[in-house]
Amino acid sequence: MAKGVNKVFLLGNLGKDPEIRTTPNGMTVATFTLATAERAKGADGQWADKTEWHNLVAFQRTAEIIRDYVKKGSQVYIEGKLQTRSWDDKESGQKKYRTEILVNELTLLGGRGEGGGSSSGSGYSRSSSSGSSSSASYSGGSTSTPDYADQQITDDDIPF
């Protein structure tokens, strides 16, 4: 059988503060919801926004970054994969299902004070593969040297 592809790309805003917990063996887990929106013309010809809510889960260092830097309203870019898990409900005895996105890569977006990097594109990016080895990088929003020296533009010229 051919190999399949399970890849999700999302750009949206958190609907509420992430929930952070630690497993008995010390692993940090972050769960949160992300809202994405589309604009479409309805039957009446008026534009309407349609919001879709996504359940996300992040582990280890990525979860710690979410704990430290992400809050309700933060804009993030996510790369991950879909996973559906099931369990038996203790009260009703019924089998329950939940589809979630397991976060493999996280990029914080948005302006300063919004839980992300700056609007100039700098921010924190976190990626991991299989939860074991991963890399992270941070590009700060201000430097003492001009980024566009040949055009005589410095960070002080940027209005945000």
Image (tube, rainbow, N blue to C red):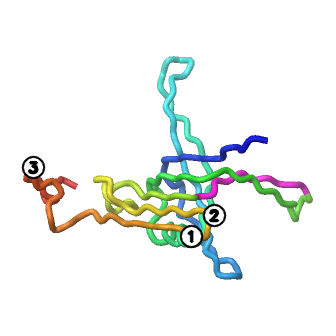
Q: Nearer the viewer, residue 128 or 103?
A: 128
> Quarter-wise, where is residue 130 in the image?
bottom right
Q: Secondary structure at mark 2?
A: loop
The kind of residue tagged 1 is: Ser
Res. 137 visible in picture: yes
Range covered by the magenta-colored residues: 94-103
Q: Position of residue 98 (x, y in %)?
A: 74, 53
Q: What residue lies at 53% left-to-right and 67% top-to-bottom?
A: 134
Q: Is disc 3 surrounded by few (<14), some (14 to 19) or many (20+) residues within 10 Å?
A: few
The kind of residue tagged 2 is: Ser
Q: For the residues marked 1 and 2, what is the alpha-carbon distance in whole angstroms?
A: 7 Å
Disc on res. 133: 1
How many numbered marks are there? 3
Q: Position of residue 118 (x, y in %)?
A: 31, 58
Q: Secondary structure at mark 1?
A: strand
Q: Position of residue 83 (x, y in %)?
A: 71, 53
In the image, farthest residue toward the left = 152
Disc on res. 114: none
Q: Is residue 18 above or below residue 83?
A: below
Q: Which residue is mark 2?
A: 130
Main secondary-structure element of the magenta-colored stretch: strand
Left or right of 17? Residue 99 is right
